[in-house]
Image: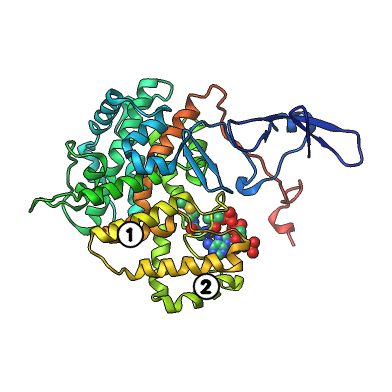
């Protein structure tokens, strides 16, 4: 493929004069994109891109990542500025509606979301169907999927009002579902939401309060929670978001689509990584053992990865990881933890990796998950809840991306093709005649 001055690229079949001119599409920022939509119909070939590393599967105005420079923008705003100055619900409004809200819009949005924090009472009985030792993500997949069986009045994806209410319902109810998942696992009564609290405070309240005594939410921990939610709110066309879009492209209802996203997020290569980081740090144990573990990571035969390092898109420091590392200091100070062995070990591992040629040559840097688990653990969350928290935050991104897709008149069902390498056509042989 060769670039041409008039905004197109031409593909020529070697040894022939057959060629096709593909228009180049320009985004606001980022690389140009070759439009291959006519490549098969006009030229008879597919493109091959397992893992979609070089494929723009959709047009989007929501999130932009420059992986080489370590830049992350939500609707144009740098993540650092939003993390420092904004709140999660303000960011949710931004992602969903395209702009930061003015004062009246912010109040409306807050009220709109918080009005929906309760679950249909019958949903409580769903929890009893799960084993107490079920992974919370298994419960999340089930209960979020079940929402579509309860909210029939907002399932028409072609009705803007239904889309609006479904978005509010998902953003509002997912924290309640998540907190109840935890309460169920530890055998405590479910705590109902409190709409006089802000989004992060309410979530911490439902997680930690018990009916037997008053519970005061720490403002520092609520702010840390809010920040973690902001940092995880959206991240362009990652695996779980692409899953939501693919499910949604068929016309499936938003609750079913978000349940699909939660399933996709669960894997250790994606949202499950923060849980995996803590397990890894626990196994390594002390900074003295860090180098030994690093040697194992570099030995391909060991199939060991440094969890929380590397990213499909970031080939530089993940900007969210920097903010997480700073937040780690604040949270540990608030909790009066002077020396956290896991944090010390993580920083030691990071220093070793950043100076090691294996990581430098492959451009492997800490990603958002490297430090988030340490903060969450210090805040009292069990490891199995880490990915659940990620799902709570990412629900905003998923539903924003789903809405954008459904509202795009050019949306078509997602249907990739393949490079078939199986048997060519052959005739059926009766069992007695098979060798
Ligand atoms: N530890 C050791 N080596 C690694 C790591 C790692 N964490 N990540 C990548 N590599 C190596 C690969 O072995 C490969 O080496 P090679 O070229 O010698 O074969 C090279 O770096 C490129 O790796 P790929 O697997 O091709 O990178 P890809 O973009 O497919 O994977 C991924 C990205 C899945 C995130 C990977 O870096 C990884 O597994 N990291 C650990 C899990 C993790 O932290 N996931 C969270 C991602 S962020 C998120 O979802 C919120």
Badge 2: how crowded within 10 Å, few (<14), some, or many (20+)? some
The residue that disc 2 covers is: 294
Asked if disc 2 is less than 8 Å from ligand 1, the answer is: no
* 341 in relation to 15, above or below: below
Horizontally, residue 124 falls left or right of residue 24, namely: left
Q: Visible in this render: residue 177?
A: yes
Tell me the CA gap for discs 1 and 2. Answer: 25 Å
Q: Are marks 1 and 2 in contact (CB under 8 Å)?
A: no
Q: Residue at position x 40%, y 51% from top?
A: 323
Percent x, y of residue 242: 52, 41
Percent x, y of residue 430: 71, 53
Q: Nearer the viewer, residue 193 or 67?
A: 67
Q: Which mark is residue 338?
A: none
Horizontally, residue 408 falls left or right of residue 427, namely: left
Secondary structure under the numbered disc 1 in the rendered image? helix
Secondary structure under the numbered disc 2 in the rendered image? helix
Q: Nearer the viewer, residue 430 or 23?
A: 23
Q: Quadrant of ligand 1?
A: bottom right
Q: Earlier in the sequence, mark 1 or mark 2?
A: 2
* 300 in relation to 17, above or below: below
Q: Residue at position x 31%, y 41% from top?
A: 174
Q: Residue at position x 91%, y 37% from top?
A: 16
Image quarter hosting the N terminus: top right
Percent x, y of residue 260: 44, 43
The residue that disc 1 covers is: 329
């Amino acid at each position: 493929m060769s670039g041409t001055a008039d905004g197109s690229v031409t593909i020529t079949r070697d040894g022939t004069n057959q060629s096709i001119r593909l228009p180049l599409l320009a985004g606001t920022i980022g690389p140009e994109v070759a439009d291959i939509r006519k490549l098969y119909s006009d030229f008879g070939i597919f493109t091959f891109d397992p893992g979609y590393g070089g494929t723009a599967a959709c047009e989007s105005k929501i999130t932009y990542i420059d992986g080489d420079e370590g830049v992350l923008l939500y609707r144009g705003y740098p993540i650092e500025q939003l993390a420092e100055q904004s709140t999660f619900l303000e960011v949710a409004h931004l992602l969903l509606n395209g702009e930061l809200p003015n004062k009246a819009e912010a109040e409306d949005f807050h009220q709109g979301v918080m009005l929906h924090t309760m679950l249909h009472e019958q949903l409580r009985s769903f929890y009893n169907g799960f084993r107490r030792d079920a992974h919370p993500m298994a419960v999340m997949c089930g209960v979020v999927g079940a929402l579509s069986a309860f909210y029939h009045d907002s399932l028409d994806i072609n009705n803007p009002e239904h889309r609006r209410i479904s978005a509010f319902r998902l953003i509002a109810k997912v924290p309640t579902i998540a907190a109840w998942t935890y309460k169920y696992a530890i055998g405590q009564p479910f705590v109902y939401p409190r709409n006089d609290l802000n989004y992060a405070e309410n979530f911490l309240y439902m997680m930690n309060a018990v009916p037997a005594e008053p519970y005061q939410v720490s403002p520092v921990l609520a702010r840390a929670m809010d920040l973690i939610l902001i940092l995880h709110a959206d991240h362009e066309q990652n695996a779980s978001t692409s899953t939501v879009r693919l499910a949604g492209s068929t016309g499936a209802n938003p609750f079913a689509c978000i349940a699909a996203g939660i399933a996709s997020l669960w894997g250790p290569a994606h949202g499950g990584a923060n849980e995996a980081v803590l397990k890894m740090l626990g196994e390594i144990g002390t900074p003295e053992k860090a180098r030994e573990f690093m040697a194992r990571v570099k030995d391909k035969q060991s199939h060991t990865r440094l969890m929380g390092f590397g990213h499909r898109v970031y080939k530089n420091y993940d900007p969210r990881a920097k903010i997480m590392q700073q937040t780690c200091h604040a949270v540990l100070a608030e909790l009066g933890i002077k020396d956290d062995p896991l944090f010390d070990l993580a920083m030691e591992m990071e220093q070793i990796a950043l100076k090691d040629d294996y990581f430098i040559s492959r451009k492997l840097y800490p990603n958002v998950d490297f430090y988030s688990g340490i903060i969450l653990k210090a805040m009292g969350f069990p490891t199995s809840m880490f990915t659940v928290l990620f799902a709570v935050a990412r629900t905003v991104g998923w539903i924003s991306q789903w809405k954008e897709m459904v509202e795009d008149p050019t949306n078509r069902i997602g249907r990739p093709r393949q490079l078939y390498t199986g048997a060519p056509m052959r005739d059926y042989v009766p069992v007695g005649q098979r060798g």
